[in-house]
Amino acid sequence: MLLTIDFDSEEPIYMQIRNGVVAGIAMGSLRDGDPLPSVRTLGSEIGVNLHTVNKAYKLLQSEGFIEIRRNRGTFIHAGNAAKNTAQFLETTGESLRNMVSEAVTREVDRAVIHKMIDNLYNELGGNT
């Protein structure tokens, strides 16, 4: 599994792992049923503590993106993520409100923000 971790980023490493898995699902490089490396293996591969990987996996599990099967492994299970859509939209709405507030304050044109979102959707293979 290809994950790029930026150890100089202000974003916590467990969130970088989480976001990398979600991006992999969005782009189609990770599909339902695909196995993920064990906590220990991924930690070793990217050079982070296994507790950090475990925290990312637990978050992904709670969000419905992965399924952890005892003694069998961890697998992509993105179909479950749809069950948490309402919670996602609520949280995302709050984040977007903050971003749009800053964009308005900086006098960024609405069309520029729309274009950025459209470009991200296209990059990640989302529906328009």
Image (spheres, grey):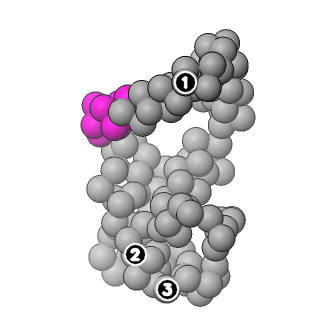
Out of 97 and 54, give the one closest to the viewer.
97
| SS for callout 3 | loop
Q: Position of residue 64 (x, y in %)?
A: 34, 50
| Spatial separation of the CA atoms under disc 3 and disc 1 | 40 Å
Q: Position of residue 82 (x, y in %)?
A: 35, 36
In the image, residue 46 above or below residue 63: below
Indicate the amino acid at tag 1.
Answer: Thr
Residue 47, x across and y down, in percent: 62, 84
How far apart are the two marked residues, 1 and 2, measured between alpha carbons?
39 Å
| Quadrant of image for the C terminus | top right
Query: Which mark is on residue 54?
Result: 2
Badge 3 crowding class, 10 Å Cα cut-off, few under 14, some 14 to 19, many 20 or more, is: some
Q: Is residue 90 magenta?
A: yes
Q: Which residue is found at the position 58% from the left and 41% from the top? A: 26
Three-letter amino acid code at the position of disc 2: Asn
Q: Is residue 82 above or below residue 21?
A: above
Disc 3 residue type (three-letter): Asn
Q: Is residue 66 magenta?
A: no
Local secondary structure at mark 1: helix
Instruction: Say which label, 3 or 1, has the lower sequence index.
Output: 3
The residue shown at (39%, 58%) is 60
- The residue at which mark 1 appears reads as 105
Q: Residue at horizontal 63%, vertical 19%?
A: 107
Image quadrant containing the N terminus: bottom right
Q: Nearer the viewer, mark 1 or mark 2?
A: 1
- Is 77 left, or right, of 48 in this rendering? left
Task: Point out the stretch of residues depicted in magenta.
Answer: 83-93
Image quarter of residue 28: top right
Q: Which residue is mark 3?
A: 49
Looking at marks 1 and 2 on the same chain, the residue that comes earlier in the sequence is marked by 2
Front one among 92 and 123:
92
Which SS does the magenta portion mostly show? helix
